[in-house]
Image (cartoon, grey):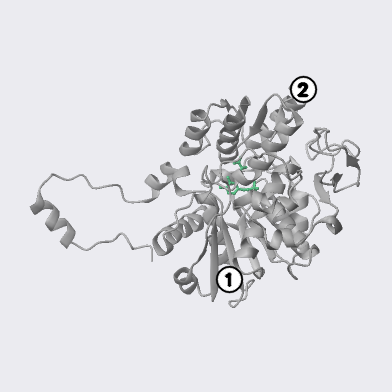
Amino acid sequence: MKEYDVKCIRCGARFPKDDIVYTCRNCVSAGPRGEPVSGGLLDILYDYSKIDRERIVKATGEGVWRYRALLPFDDEIKPISINEGNTPLYRCDRLAKSIGIEELWVKHEGLNPSGSFKDRGMTVGVTKGVELGVKGVACASTGNTSASLAIFAAKARLPCYVLLPKGKVALGKVAQAIMHGAKVFSLKGNFDDALRVVRVLCEEESIYLLNSVNPYRLEGQKTIAFEIAEKLGWAVPDRVILPVGNAGNISAIFKGFSELMTLGITTTIPRMTGIQAAGAKPIVNAFKENKEEITPEDNPETIASAIRIGNPVNAAKALHAMRSSGGGAESVTDEEITEAQLLLARQEGIGVEPASAASIAGLKKLLEMGEIERDERIVCVTTGHLLKDPERVIQICEPPIEVEADVDVLRKMVRSPFEAMKCM
Ligand code: F0G
């Protein structure tokens, strides 16, 4: 049996492996709004002295399950899997040059099976749910979590309930959730409202919650760090930059790099740098004001709907990741996000949804502010695929030109100046 503990990061209380628990029951206190759900966050901790580092360095298989020596399952487990992970790490020299740095890599998580990094967490979370014998799964979502959960629930033949903020979820994500058979609720409220109610619903109805407050989700997502280090020859970049919403992913990637160091595979941890949208930046505020706790934002707003979150549940883990790695936090405007989305698409051929482009927008801004050295080796994580949010593309790009099936007309048009590359 793989030995690990489910442990509260705040008070250290431990919970049995077969207990369905999301936040600590021992140190429950009133949350920022008086809600009784803010026991400390939980983490999965292994006995690292019993983990053979060779099983990571010489791992076999592909994607998330390649690293099963550092996942909370026995080796015999049959995962609920659709080949998640194993995403490309692109070296982006042209983009690096245009923004004035030496070495830029983009880890394109949009090339996961459902089009976002959420699949890494869901393969682990849903496999754990099946092991625990749950009768159904649920989540609140700005879109990608619901798309991914719907797919893995279908694969596991489990009923799936998802709560989406009404009118605020990109079209591709809604399409995925309904196509794969989830029961989809369009909630009159924002993401934070949806998460608040789904947490209570899951407790009361014994449905398994698969938002990133579930610590098993983050176990899958930490494999982003393993893949980055492995593709760089078990080396660690100076900095990793990624968008932050509910703040699970930055916490997970930090954990992955920390584990590699604990096992003696690597010797440093990258500066973990989180980017939020200017209209939804509670973590950036807390980071800059040196506060331990965030002040929730009531009306978060941004075109990057994936990270339109005012009360991120993993804030404590994310602030620790950014501070203890010497990283940072910055916010970017919707215009900066759009510009970065176009740059990635047109200079590097990498199609991402707006939230993902926040990583590049943040890099540009931090460079201009002098917060990042130009010779740092940087990895930006692009979290979701362009096709997730086609409506935004239509808003920001030239529409197709309607034309007669007439060569003379077309000839004239192709001979006139072509402005598609104007963003550069
Ligand atoms: N990028 C994309 C494309 C996302 O969908 C999300 C989160 C994030 C970044 C932020 O990640 O929450 O771990 O800090 N989407 C969640 C969802 C909230 O419901 O799909 P985080």
Position of the C terminus, as image quadrant, is: bottom left
Q: Which residue is mark 1?
A: 367
Kindly state the secondary structure of the residue where label 1 is placed: helix
Name the residue type under label 1.
Leu
First reached walking from the N terminus: tag 1 or tag 2: 2
Name the residue at the top extreme. 205
Separation (CA) of disc 1 from disc 2: 48 Å
**Side of 208 relative to 393 (left or right):** right
Q: Which residue is mark 2?
A: 204
Q: Residues within 10 Å of mark 1 (few under 14, many from 20)?
A: some
Name the residue type under label 2.
Glu
Residue 271 visible here: yes
From what the image shows, is residue 169 above or below residue 363? above
Look at 64% across and 50% down and name the residue there. Answer: 64
Q: Residue 61 versus residue 92: which sits nearer the camera?
A: 61
Q: Residues within 10 Å of mark 2 (few under 14, many from 20)?
A: few
